[in-house]
Amino acid sequence: MDLEEIFIKYRPVISFRVRKSIGAGNPDWEDIVNEVITNAIEKIQKGEFRGESSIGTFIYTITSRRIVDYIRQKGKVLRHAPQPADYPDPQERIEEKERVELMARALKRLKPKYRKVLYLYYYKEFSREEVAQKLGISPRRVSERVNYSQKLLKKYLKK
Amino acid sequence: MKNCKFEELIDEYLLNRLSEEKKEEFEEHYFNCPSCFEKTTQRNELLRVIKTKGDMIFEDEFRPHEARGASLAERILSFLTPKQWAMTAVSAAVILVIVFGVILRPNHPTFQIVSSETETRSGKSIELLSPMLDINAVPTEFRWAKSDKELEYKFYIFSNGNQLWTTTTKENFVVLPEEVRNLLKPMVKYSWEVKGFIPEGAIVAFSSKVYFRVIKTE
C-alpha cells in the first residue's frame, strides 16, 4: 500500500470534512488534519486496516472520531457549524482571494435568469420548491439552472 | 453517463439541511467517491463566493432600495456646489498623500519576489538553509534564516507538486514527524517552502521553493 499516494489523495477530503465540521475560520483545522493523517498512518502500519471496509471509510471513521473528540474538548456544537468564512488563512489568502474575485466577476456576467436562481437558492437560502414557485418554473428547472450556471462559470474561468 | 444518486444531496449537505444520519452517510460516501467529492467542493466554492460577495454580485437587479439610493445620491451631490466639491476633493487628496506617504511609510521597504514562473509576490524574502539538492539521509530538520521581526512561519513540504505535510511554528526550523519521514523515498524529488506571517494572519514574507532528494538511505 503506497501511503504517500493515499494521503496525497485523502488530505483534501479530510481537510474539507474537518473545516465543514468545525468551521473554516477555526485555525485548529490544520492541526486536526495532520493528527488524523498521522493516526491513520500509524494504524495502517500496525496492521489495523484489514480491508474489511474501504480505505476511504477507514479514514472517514478516524476523521469523524477526531472531530467528535475535538468538539467535546472545546465544548462546541457539531451541528449547524458556520459556513466557510472569509478568514485570513495564510495558506489560502492570496490565491483564494484572487479566485473569489474572479468568480464573483464571472457570476455578475451571467444572464439574469441564472443569477435570479442563484440569488434565491444560495444567497437567500429558499428551498428548491420555493424558488420554483417564486419564479414560476419547475423545481427540476431550478436544479438545471444551478448546474448550468456552474458550467458557464467554469467556462468563464478557463478563458 | 449515469449520475451518482448522492449528487442530489450535495446542496442539502452544504446548506446544513440534512439529518445527522443522512449527513454522516453522505460524508462517508464522498470519502469513497472522488466524483461526488469534486462536485461538492466545486459547489461549496460557488456557495462561498455567493455568501461572501453576494452584495456585490446581486447589487444591480435585486436590491429593492435601489430607487431610494438614487434620490439619496442626488441629495448628497446637491449638498455642495461643483466648486466646493472640487476643493473638497483636492483637500482629501492632500490628506491622503500625507497619511500614506509620510505617516504610514513602512520602516523596511518591501520588494517583489518571483516565487515561481507564474507567480510574483510582495513581501520580504525568507532564505532557506537546509536541506537542499542531493542529500545522504532522510532529513529530520528543516531550517531557514530567522527574520528580524517576530513572525509565525508556515512550513510546507511537497511531493510532485502536491502538499505532503504542513505545520506552523514560531521557530526558524521544524522537525519532521517520524510518520512523515517514513513517507520520503530515496531518489524522489521533494520540495519545501516557508511563508512568514504576522499574528493578524497577513503574509509578510516568503521563501522560494527548494528541491531536495535523498540519494542514499541510512
Image (spheres, coloured by chain):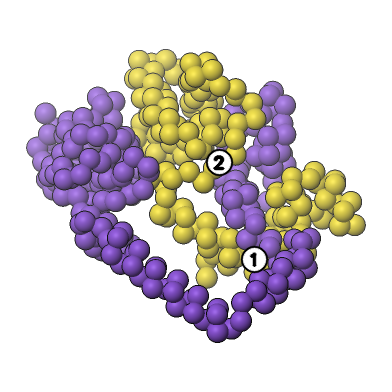
Chain colours: A yellow, B purple
A32 on left or right of B16: left
Q: What amino acid type is highlighted by mark number 1? A: Lys
Q: What residue is drawn where x is 67% and y is 77%?
A: B78
Residue found farthest to the bottom: B83
Q: What residue is drawn where x is 78% and y is 68%?
A: B67
**Circle count:** 2
Label 1 crowd bin: few (<14), some (14–19), many (20+), radius 10 Å? some
Instruction: Confirm whether circles 2 and 1 share one chain.
Output: yes
> Of callouts 2 and 1, which one flags the residue occurring earlier in the amino acid sequence?
2
Q: In the rendered image of this protein, does residue B182 appear above or below residue A83?
A: above
Q: What residue is drawn where x is 46% and y is 59%?
A: A98
In percent of width and height, residue A42 lies at 35, 19
Which is nearer the eye, B80 or A93? B80
Q: Secondary structure at mark 1?
A: helix
**Mark pair 2, 1: CA separation:** 21 Å
Chain bearing mark 1? A
Residue B102: in sight, yes or no? yes
Q: Which residue is mark 2?
A: A84
Q: For residue B19, which numbered disc appears in the image?
A: none
Which is nearer the eye, B149 or B153? B149
Dividing the picture into quadrants, the one containing residue A90 is top left
Label 2 crowd bin: few (<14), some (14–19), many (20+), radius 10 Å? many
Q: In the rendered image of this protein, does residue B154 appear above or below residue B77?
A: above
Residue B157: in sight, yes or no? no
Q: What amino acid type is highlighted by mark number 2? A: Pro
Which is nearer the eye, A47 or B172? B172
B113 on left or right of B17: left
Q: Which residue is mark 1?
A: A108
Q: In the rendered image of this protein, does residue B127 appear above or below residue A110?
A: above
Quadrant where the N terminus of chain A is found in the figure: top left
